[in-house]
Amino acid sequence: MKIAKLLTWMGMGCILVTMGTGCATHIAPHTVHVTMDANMADAAGMLPSVEVHLLAVNAYESYDTERIPYQEYWKPNRVRRRSEDMHMMHFGGQHAETLELKRNHPIWKLWDAQRAVDLYAFADIPEATHSGDWRVIVPLKLSRWWFPRKREVILRLERSGVFDRSPERYRREIYRPAYR
């Protein structure tokens, strides 16, 4: 009888430990490639000036971040998040057509410490204001990825917005933002 109780308590303890570690929010750093479409160049071959913000947010911030309108986010005097919380990329003119955020960049440690669950890419592309394609949301939790070792996100800037062109590596069909 005592052995049965002991085994029952040990089993319950193992279940609680397993549940606790399974629900922990840990992200794995991803290499994020952002490419500007060559069709965005003007007749002289100059690329337009486009600013891209990569920002990882936790479940609490995700609700507000997803709902902010384009005009509000890119307002000139708006108080944004601190610049050390986000990774900024600048395209156009003399800049390269492809920029990347490496998975060994120190900002990933900051985002993991903040318990980030989603990566937002905001692009200042005025043509994309009405369609809502000025931002992309990519899940960061390992449980959302089919192949966690192949952590690569490929984003493409086009006239109509920013689009995720990554291979089907994360589970888009079951992905829901954390607040739902």
Image (cartoon, rainbow, N blue to C red):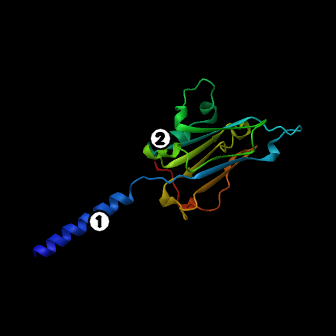
Residue 128, percent from left and from top: 70, 41
Q: Residues within 10 Å of mark 2 (few under 14, many from 20)?
A: some
Q: Quadrant of residue 130?
A: top right
In percent of the image, x 33 and y 63: which residue is there?
18
Tag 1 secondary structure:
helix
Tag 2 secondary structure:
helix
Residue under label 1: 15
Residue 15, percent from left and from top: 29, 65
Give how far apart the Cα atoms at labels 2 and 1 are: 30 Å
Q: Quadrant of residue 151?
A: bottom right
Q: Amino acid at mark 2?
A: Glu
Residue 106 vertical placement versus 74 (above, below): below
Residue 79, percent from left and from top: 54, 26
In percent of the image, x 63 and y 35: which residue is there?
70
Q: Nearer the viewer, mark 2 or mark 1?
A: 1
Residue under label 2: 61
In percent of the image, x 52 and y 31: which residue is there?
82
Residue 44 vertical placement versus 162 (above, below): above
Q: How many marks?
A: 2
Q: Amino acid at mark 1?
A: Ile
Q: Nearer the viewer, residue 136 or 91?
A: 91
The disc, 2 or 1, on the residue closer to the chain's N-terminal end is 1
Q: Quadrant of the N terminus?
A: bottom left
Q: Is residue 98 left or right of residue 60?
A: right
